[in-house]
Image: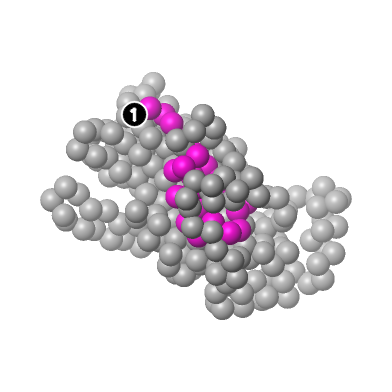
Amino acid sequence: AVIKILEDSPLFNAGKGSVFTYEGEIKMDASIMHGKTLDAGAVTNVSTIKNPIAAAKEVMKTKYILFSGSGAEEFAEENGCEIVDPFYFYTEHQFKRWLQTKDTLGPNKILIDSIKNLQPISYEDNLIVDKNSGTVGCVVLDKYGNLAAGTSTGGLMNKQFGRIGDSPIIGAGTYANNNTCAISCTGTGEDFIRMVAANTASNLMEFEDYTVQQALDTVIQKRFLQIKGDGGMIAVDKYGNISFSYNSDGMFRGSVNDKGEVWVGIYQ
């Protein structure tokens, strides 16, 4: 329910507020995982599912884990998810940012040629990471001791066709295990995939006896230095300890406990 609310808002790069791809389309990803059963579901590169996280939840009910593109959209419609016209996701501010990005890159062929020539892509120069809004995620611990995590995103502004980030990849952008914690990630997806970030943090807790804060800091503040990675993680462990770590300028985050106490943060 939390992620659906965020997807319905134009303020975040997920659902209604998703960024535009290189081709001027909107392609969204989402995933969800249950810590008790390790069941998981995800969708990627979808354009007509109003709430991708709802589709991911439906996938989790099957024997499969990840559906993509038109197949994911057909599956979502068959299982009662709301389908909308792609124009529903259009927002003026993201469209203007995309046009500005295209102008910054120059003629389209410059970026395409760099791909054909197998030259490395600079995410700071060629793919604009949204500094004002971003991927949304949620981690929870219920009264029965079960953990769950979910993540939803529109991806990188001006991303190339077919590109998939970490958000729909279980173990990279989303992970939950009742033995350790639930984690959701945000940032440059390729960095989280390389480090299998969410699962790595969980493994540090399970096999090296790290606390949840130590595990997150080890991944984000230390191991990400190896690849100059950028991003952050939120987590809650099996005891209800809430943690976060990021190496960017800031990360919007908030929490509420069983007493109804609310906390919100942006920077330190």
* Residue at which label 1 appears: 36
Residue 48 on the magenta span? yes
Where is residue 19 shown, x and y percent of the image? 58, 65
- Mark 1, Cα crowd under 10 Å, few <14 / some 14-19 / many 20+, is some
Tally of numbered discs: 1
On screen, residue 10 versus residue 92, left or right, reads: left
* Amino acid marked by disc 1: Lys
Q: Is residue 214 magenta?
A: no
State the quadrant of the C terminus.
bottom left
Please report the residue visible at 68 percent of the width from the left and 75 percent of the height from the top.
Answer: 99
Q: Is residue 15 visible?
A: yes
Relative side of 103 to 95, left or right: right
| Residue 224 image point, x, y percent | 53, 42
At horizontal 27% and vertical 40% (from top left) the residue drawn is 141
Please tell me in which quadrant of the rendered image residue 252 appears: bottom left
Write the start and end of the magenta stretch as one range: 37-59
Residue that lies at the very extreme toward the top in this rendered image: 207
Q: Which is more toward the observer, 41 or 19?
A: 41
Residue 213 figure quarter:
top left
Asked if residue 108 is positioned above or below residue 225 in the image, the reply reads below
Q: Residue at x 36, y 24 (%)?
A: 206
160 sits left or right of 177 in the view: right
* Whether residue 128 is visible: no
Q: Does residue 200 lie above or below 136 as drawn?
A: above
The residue at 59%/66% (across/down) is 85
Extreme residue in the left direction: 259
Q: Quadrant of residue 122?
A: bottom right
Residue 143 spot, x, y in % from top left? 19, 38
Residue 105 falls left or right of residue 9? right
